[in-house]
Image (cartoon, rainbow, N blue to C red):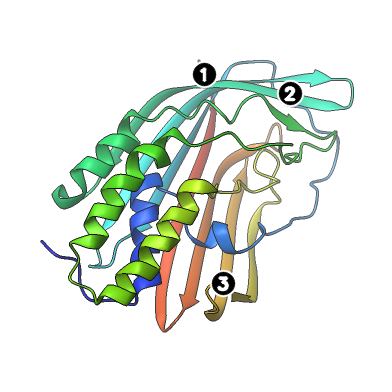
């Protein structure tokens, strides 16, 4: 089944997110910053389970839902904290037409996230380097084949193919909220103008709603909703995080 004749960059964005389950808004802007919670950061000395669920929309109104669970431990180091972890579960729900891309995502293990470093307040420090993406290497040929069979005019296909090629050479990664492990409870909203490398202008809105554990002040649940208005289209991606002590 051929994808609809849509603005080519938008199709490329959808295909890239289908391949990697990453929200395109994360490619376009820095994450929403937050204030620091009160008191000293005191993570529990126990193994915990961190689950991230990503809802990524597609052009036809359907969505890809990718859920990953990590077993993590947080230990104090000289200048902050070190988070060690490993992926222990992954599920991907996608339309049958995207079965090949979903299978790549289902078999992908997030092994480049850890160790993750936190500062003394519990805020995530950005990594010095970003690891290559094996998922993009496998998904790019499938996405390119879908684009070439899309029925778009040749010039539009060429533009979309160039977009995927750029992602293949320099993969985008989704920034986790820097206060993920110690969010300020409640809702906050950030709204900003954006311009892509292709010259499209639009708007980006990031909404975060967080709950914390009463005993530790650490993350209990957090939802981040990213709405992108770009080139006449509107797209909303939702991410959910949950943190529990592994009994």
Label annotation for residue 82: 2
Question: Residue 156 at x, y = what percent?
Answer: 32, 75
Query: Helix, strand, or loop for circle 2?
Result: strand
Observer-nearest residue: 134 or 60? 134
**Among the 4 quarters of the image, the one containing residue 35:** bottom right
Above or below 6: residue 239:
above
Q: Which residue is mark 3?
A: 196
Query: Helix, strand, or loop for circle 1?
Result: loop
Label annotation for residue 246: 1
Label annotation for residue 61: none
Q: Residues within 10 Å of mark 1 (few under 14, many from 20)?
A: few
Q: Is residue 167 left or right of residue 184?
A: left
Task: Give the residue displayed 58% in from the left and 33% down from the top.
Answer: 131
Question: Residue 241 at x, y = what percent?
Answer: 51, 42
Name which of mark 3 and mark 2 comes first in the sequence.
2
Query: Helix, strand, or loop for circle 3?
Result: loop
């Amino acid at each position: 089944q051929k994808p609809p004749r849509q603005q080519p960059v938008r199709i490329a964005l959808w295909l890239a997110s289908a391949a990697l389950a990453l929200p395109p808004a994360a490619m376009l802007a820095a994450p929403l910053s937050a204030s620091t919670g009160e008191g000293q950061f005191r993570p529990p000395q126990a193994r915990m389970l961190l689950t991230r669920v990503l809802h990524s929309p597609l052009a036809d109104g359907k969505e890809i839902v990718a859920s990953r669970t990590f077993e993590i431990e947080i230990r104090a180091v000289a200048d902050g904290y070190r988070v060690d972890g490993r992926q222990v579960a992954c599920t991907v729900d996608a339309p049958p037409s995207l079965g090949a891309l979903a299978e790549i995502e289902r078999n992908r293990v997030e092994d480049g996230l850890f160790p993750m470093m936190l500062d003394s307040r519990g805020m995530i420090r950005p990594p010095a380097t970003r690891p290559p993406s094996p998922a993009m290497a496998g998904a790019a040929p499938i996405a390119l084949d879908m684009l070439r069979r899309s029925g778009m005019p040749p010039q539009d296909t060429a533009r979309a193919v160039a977009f995927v090629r750029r992602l293949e050479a320099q993969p985008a990664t989704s920034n986790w909220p820097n206060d993920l492990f110690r969010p300020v409870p409640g809702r906050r909203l950030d709204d900003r103008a954006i311009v892509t490398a292709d010259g499209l202008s639009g708007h980006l809105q990031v909404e975060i709603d967080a709950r914390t554990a009463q005993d530790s002040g650490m993350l209990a649940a957090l939802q981040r909703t990213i709405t992108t208005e770009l080139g006449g289209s509107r797209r909303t991606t939702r991410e959910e995080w949950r943190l529990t002590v592994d009994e």
